[in-house]
Image: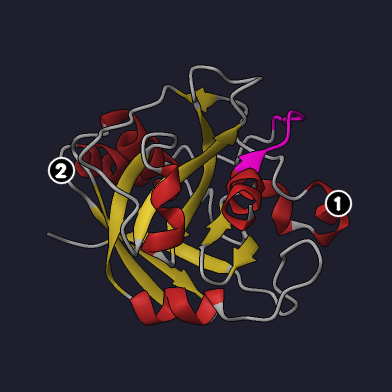
Amino acid sequence: MRHNIFKLLLIIPLLVFSCKGKQKDTQEETIKQEDMTMIEEPIFDIVTNVGTIRVKLYKETPLHRDNFVKLATQGFFNGIRFHRVIQGFMIQTGDPLSKDMANEASFGTGGPGYTIPAEIIPELKHKKGALAAARRGDAANPMKESSGSQFYIVENAETCAQLDGEYTVFGETLEGLDVVDKIAATPTNFRDRPVSDIIIISVTPVKQ
């Protein structure tokens, strides 16, 4: 029963807002994005106010990989909170509405205004540190399309194993599992939102 409750907490409510991140049009940024999309499995540092999580994106999920690269190089994630944290399960972020506490009641419903076709690969499991895309529930989303920006990081592989085959896993944590555990252990309120803000400062590419 508790596992089913956990699963429901990952589902984005039916109400979806179009909140396009502010885009930069400089030539420098365009070059950076193009350079990153030429790398099969790009690596990024998710820098937060409590530490850095280094992640690798999978070549087997190119739509999710390229979308993450695009958003990261545009600075879309900068200032976004981890809005849902469940110790012994996962930590979730990527909602642009969470940049403003005036939107707290709607945290978990925001995005860039589009979804991504599912890329569910049986071999890519919800192991500890895995990156996976949040999405709306099956009733409103039978094709299991992913949120355009919201994602979660697995803190406990055992409790997240039930999500295999249901959500797109598109990356993994290379370094910073201690930071994932630290975020997961932070006190939360009745909405599973950390009492003390945990914010993404930047998502920056790592040279390979």
- Within the image, what quadrant is residue 46 found in? bottom left
Residues in magenta, as a range: 11-18
Q: Main secondary structure of the magenta part?
A: loop
Residue 63: x and y in percent read 33, 29
Find out whether residue 208 is within the magenta segment.
no
The amino acid on which the numbered mark 2 sits, given as a three-letter code, is: Ile
Residue at 52 percent across and 34 percent down: it is 148
- Mark 1 Cα-neighbour bin, 10 Å: few <14, some 14–19, many ≥20: few
Residue at 69 percent across and 81 percent down: it is 187
Residue 203: x and y in percent read 42, 60
Q: Is residue 130 left or right of residue 95?
A: left
Residue at 82 percent across and 56 percent down: it is 104
Under circle 2, the secondary element is: loop
Q: Which numbered disc covers residue 105?
A: 1
- Of 115 and 120, nearer the camera is 120
Give the foreground label among 2 and 1.
1
Mark-to-mark CA distance, 2 and 1: 38 Å
The first of marks 2 and 1 along the sequence is 2
- Of 157 and 33, nearer the camera is 157
Q: Is residue 30 visible?
A: no
Q: Which residue is labeled 2 in the image?
A: 39
